[in-house]
Image (cartoon, rainbow, N blue to C red):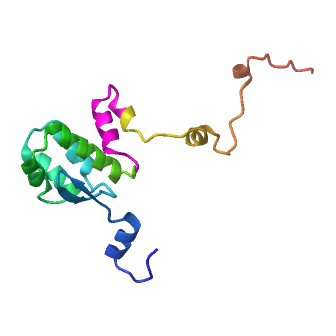
Amino acid sequence: MTAAGSSWDDFKREAFGNRTEDIEGVTVRVPSDLPFGFGDRLADLSTSSDRQDVEDLVDALFGPEVLDQWIEAGIGSMGLMTILTWGMAQGSGQTDFTFQDAYAALTSEDPGKALAPPQNRAERRARSRTTGGRSRRTTPASTGSTPAASRD
């Protein structure tokens, strides 16, 4: 990692990366974290068709004036939604999430499932294992057996 006393910018660049991607002829920084309040802005966008709301969202994720450049390049609404979906996945840490994955999520019958990161067998098994803590005592009523009678 960074040397003691290094700046936040140095740390951020090293920890979060500084990848770029060419999208519609515009080089943008690949989001490595979602900006604060991004979820609220996205929710607002679902009920708004105001260009300023869209621009605010794109600015937060990819930087200022990017939307104007994409519009000049001829981007459509599905293309923009695909890019935003991809950017959100990247910012959430899903660095292996592709533009194809984003498009599939948008056109899926179940977008929530399509947006979920893929799990391999080991990850699924690890999640289903016990936590290692003590379990609660099983009551006789839940075991299906009859309790032993007392011999007094």
Q: Position of residue 95 (x, y in %)?
A: 39, 52
Q: Nearer the viewer, residue 12 or 18?
A: 18
The single residue placed furthest to the right in the displayed view is: 152
- Residue shown at 57%/38% (left/top)? 121
Q: Nearer the viewer, residue 44 or 23?
A: 23
- Residue shown at 43%/77% (left/top)? 2
Q: Position of residue 17 (x, y in %)?
A: 36, 65
- Residue shown at 22%/59% (left/top)? 28
Taking the magenta stretch, the answer to whether it contains residue 110 is: yes
Residue 35 vertical position relative to residue 4 in the rendered view, above or below: above
Q: Residue 47: name its quadrant.
A: top left
Taking the magenta stretch, the answer to whether it contains residue 99 is: yes
Q: Position of residue 73 (x, y in %)?
A: 10, 49
Magenta-drawn segment: 96-112
> On the picture, is 43 further left or further right than 48?
right
Residue 15 vertical position relative to residue 130 in the rendered view, above or below: below
Instruction: Mark yes or no: residue 61 visible.
Output: no
Q: Residue 99: name its quadrant.
A: top left
Q: Position of residue 128 (x, y in %)?
A: 60, 37
Magenta stretch: helix, strand or loop mostly: helix
Q: Residue 141: name its quadrant.
A: top right
